[in-house]
Image (cartoon, rainbow, N blue to C red):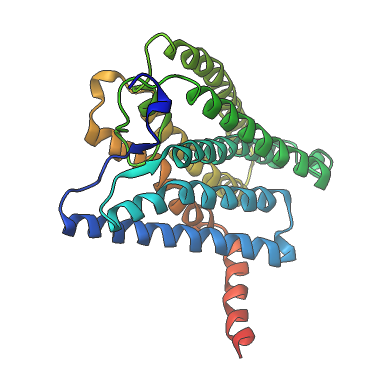
């Protein structure tokens, strides 16, 4: 194949060859997918309907839940459909769309997590200025900046990736269209453009990571200065869910994209891809609701209203 126009579809990596294992994969992914949709949907509904949760922290959490639903909806349904219908094919345009939407949602989520670190920093280290620094207008601007940056990031990488001639066939060694796997099909001379773009992207990602780390260094320093144990416990409870989500997100993504080539294998790459693209959207609602009394109360009220509305 001389270039990418020589074919109109890609072949994704199958989870299993036997029909029984294919159905097991479909059932497992279906359960995870429904759990992610339900968990994030409950958080979105609770935050939108309960006026007690109309604060910057929960506004950003609502945006995070929307992005989580988008992230998992980009990859999992197609993988389930392929297992159910015993096929590996994805059209050229669908593959490009999958890469764009996945990059859009996952990068916007990372930028939003950076904004949320700033929210926690101001709440704990600058509590008297919280209402000024994080008023409604500022929150909308920061959330919009995360969404727009994610959109531009996805558009730039998708456009660059699919402008590179593909000379090594159309078999993608992953269960969804992933840029590193697509680039393995490219011509070596055109690969350098994506490498240069990745250097710029890594600089941006690393800058956000440093910002998050420095924010939490100052947060923990401020928390340890709180004289009362109850005050320290409350402050830690405000930060731990976000810190857990950031740790899960960053560790899985960094391992997926920065692991040495010697550790790379089809099975390991598949597991890591599931860990960073499927697990976080399903687990994040649990991490945020587990130690959050306000969110638990809002969810209880929501469940109490459901039977009344049905009657």
Quarter of the image with the N terminus in it: top left
Q: Give residue 142's position: percent from left, percent from top.
A: 73, 38
> In the image shown, does 133 or 9 lie closer to the viewer?
9
52 left or right of 271?
right
Q: Compared with residue 118, is residue 86 higher up or lower down, i.e. above or below?
A: below
Q: Residue at x 41, y 54 (%)?
A: 77
Answer with left or right where residue 76 lies relative to residue 263.
Answer: right
**Which quadrant, please, contains the C terminus?**
bottom right
How far across and how far down the image is residue 203, in percent?
A: 56, 17
Query: On the image, which quarter does residue 177 sit in?
Result: top left
**Relative vertical location of residue 50 with respect to residue 60 in this rendering, above or below:** below
* Residue at the limit of the structure toward the bottom, as seen here: 311
Residue 139 image point, x, y percent = 76, 43
Q: Is residue 188 above or below residue 66?
A: above
Residue 157 in the image: state x and y as whole percent. Answer: 53, 26
Task: Residue at 59%, 80% (x, y): give it.
Answer: 306
Q: Nearer the viewer, residue 235 or 99?
A: 99
For the point 64% across and 49% down, the residue is 63
């Amino acid at each position: 194949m001389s270039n990418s126009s020589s074919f109109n579809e890609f072949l994704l990596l199958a989870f299993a060859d036997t029909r029984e294992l294919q159905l097991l994969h479909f059932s497992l992914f279906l359960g995870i997918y429904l759990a992610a949709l339900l968990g994030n949907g409950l958080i979105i509904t609770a935050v939108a309907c309960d006026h007690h949760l109309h604060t910057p922290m929960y506004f950003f959490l609502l945006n995070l839940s929307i992005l989580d639903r988008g992230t998992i909806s980009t990859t999992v349904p197609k993988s389930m459909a392929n297992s159910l219908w015993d096929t590996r094919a994805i059209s050229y345009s669908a593959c490009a769309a999958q890469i764009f939407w996945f990059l859009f949602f996952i990068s916007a989520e990372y930028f939003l997590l950076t904004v949320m670190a700033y929210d926690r920093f101001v709440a704990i280290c600058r509590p008297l200025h919280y209402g000024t620094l994080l008023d409604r207008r500022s929150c909308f601007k920061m959330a919009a900046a995360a969404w727009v940056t994610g959109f531009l990031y996805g558009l730039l990488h998708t456009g660059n990736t699919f402008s590179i001639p593909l000379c090594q066939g159309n078999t993608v060694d992953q269960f969804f269209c992933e840029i590193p796997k697509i680039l393995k099909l490219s011509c070596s001379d055109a690969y350098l453009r994506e490498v240069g773009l990745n250097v710029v992207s890594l600089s941006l990602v690393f800058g956000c990571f440093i910002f998050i780390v420095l924010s939490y260094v100052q947060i923990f320093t401020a928390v340890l200065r709180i004289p009362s144990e109850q005050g320290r416990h409350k402050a830690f409870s405000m930060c731990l869910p976000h810190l857990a989500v950031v740790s899960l997100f960053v560790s899985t993504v960094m391992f997926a994209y920065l692991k040495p080539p010697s550790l790379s294998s089809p099975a390991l790459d598949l597991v890591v891809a599931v860990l960073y693209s499927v697990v976080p959207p399903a687990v994040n609602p649990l991490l945020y609701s587990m130690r959050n009394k306000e969110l638990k109360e809002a969810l209880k009220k929501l469940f109490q209203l459901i039977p009344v509305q049905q009657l």
